[in-house]
Amino acid sequence: MLINNWYVAAESADVVVGKPLAVRMLGCDFVLFRQTDGQVACLSNVCPHRGASLAHGRCEESTVACPFHGWRFAADGRCIDIPSMGPDFRIPPRARVDSYPTHEVYGWIWAFLGDLPEEERPPVPELLPEFHDTERWRTTRMVVEAPVNWEKFEENSLDTAHLSFVHRAFGNRMDPRATLVPIERTAYGARVARERTPPRPEAKTGVLGQILSQPRDKTSVQLEFSLLGLCHRIQPTFRPGVSQVVFSASTPIDARNTRQFGLQARNYAIEPEHDAERLAGRREAIDEDISVVRHVRPKIGPTPLAEETLVKADEMEAIFRSLVIKMIEAGWEIDHDKVEREWDRKVYVIPSPARRLDPKGWAHEAVPTTRPRTGFGWRDLARQAGEIANRLGVGEAA
Ligand code: FES
Ligand SMILES: [Fe+2]
């Protein structure tokens, strides 16, 4: 799991004024709460006094009050009240928790879980402009928790070759070939346009089945991912003018479990009464994915390229994996083995920007990383776009 990335922490609708929300991400605990001005705060959830869960406390104005002894914390993580000591007490600087930048778009609360200063943080990836075009597109939303590793789950989403085998309603086993076309590197990911043979007409049911009941040409599929935000966009066009877009972002709950936030926009049957059917179709597809990926070994990615046998059709996944490895080499990978081993005795937290400015005087230690930090960051990754794909040599390895 990587620090210094944007992650979707919650659906906007679940973060309401006056009620703290507990969220587990990257194997750590957080509390979200909405301030009276509407802004959402995201703090480390473990009270620096004696370790209670802030999310089990109460919101008072734009602060969260610990359930144990009532210490109150502002959105910037500083303690502003220690009731047992009275109003004249000088609050010690250690009485603070890490606070993380947030951003709200698409009905999702994103949190930047890391310590990069503002000028080194890229913007939240916005890959679904259709969301805002409500005249022509109707969007449904879904949150799924899966007992699979985030890296393996995300690779599966970028994998065109599995469709014919895993998904009843998408692929066609009679012609499972992937079209091998050049992949375009983007600043933080890659994009490709492929074609596939549509399934038999009867594989599509419901309103889409009616629209697509006649034999048709190839389905063209545009696929794009961004390591920033761990998100991807998949847009099949079934027939000219008939299209849908899935935009999903994966948030690791821990190394073995992932919460996937998904939006699906469609430009056909946009009346709300068709939502339930679309959601059911999406759920079926995700369950089909999970049923395979949960048994993949090794369970936790990224797996070294040399320990699998990738072919050219796997190039998107290979690019994703190589970008993940870049960030591991930059020292952004949490040493989750160590964190889990010490779980019962020690609290580790994701380091925040304030901790970077002032590294001493915190009750809890920052999570250990598997390698030392090198200073390589998002800007360097963007600068290198293009080079990595050329050097991959996927399909040529022995
Ligand atoms: S443990 Fe939070 S106020 Fe004491
Ligand atoms: Fe799939």
Image: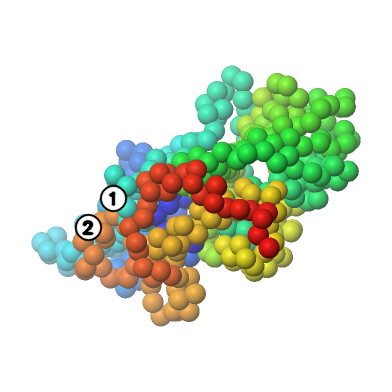
In the image: residue 69, left or right of residue 123? left
The total of numbered circles placed on residues is 2
Q: Secondary structure at mark 1?
A: loop
In the displayed structure, would residue 154 be above or below residue 295?
Answer: above
Which three-letter amino acid code belongs to the residue tagged 1? Pro
Quadrant location of the C terminus in the rendered image? bottom right
Identify the residue position indicated by label 1 in the image: 117
Question: Cβ of disc 1 within 8 Å of ligand 1?
Answer: no
Nearer the N terminus, badge 2 or badge 1? 1
Can residue 65 be seen? no
Point out the residue furthest to the top here.
Answer: 135
In the image: residue 12, left or right of residue 164? left
Dividing the picture into quarters, in which one does residue 262 lie? top right
Position of residue 242 measured from the top left corner of the image (x, y, whole percent): 72, 24
Position of residue 319 measured from the top left corner of the image (x, y, whole percent): 57, 50
Q: Nearer the viewer, residue 55 or 210?
A: 210
Can residue 254 be seen? yes
In the displayed structure, would residue 221 be above or below residue 60?
Answer: above
Position of residue 225 measured from the top left corner of the image (x, y, whole percent): 56, 43
Identify the residue position indicated by label 2 in the image: 357
Q: Secondary structure at mark 2?
A: helix
Q: Are marks 2 and 1 in contact (CB under 8 Å)?
A: yes
Question: For mark 1, does the 10 Å Cα neighbourhood hold few (<14), some (14 to 19), or many (20 or more) residues?
Answer: few
Dividing the picture into quarters, in which one does residue 304 lie? bottom right
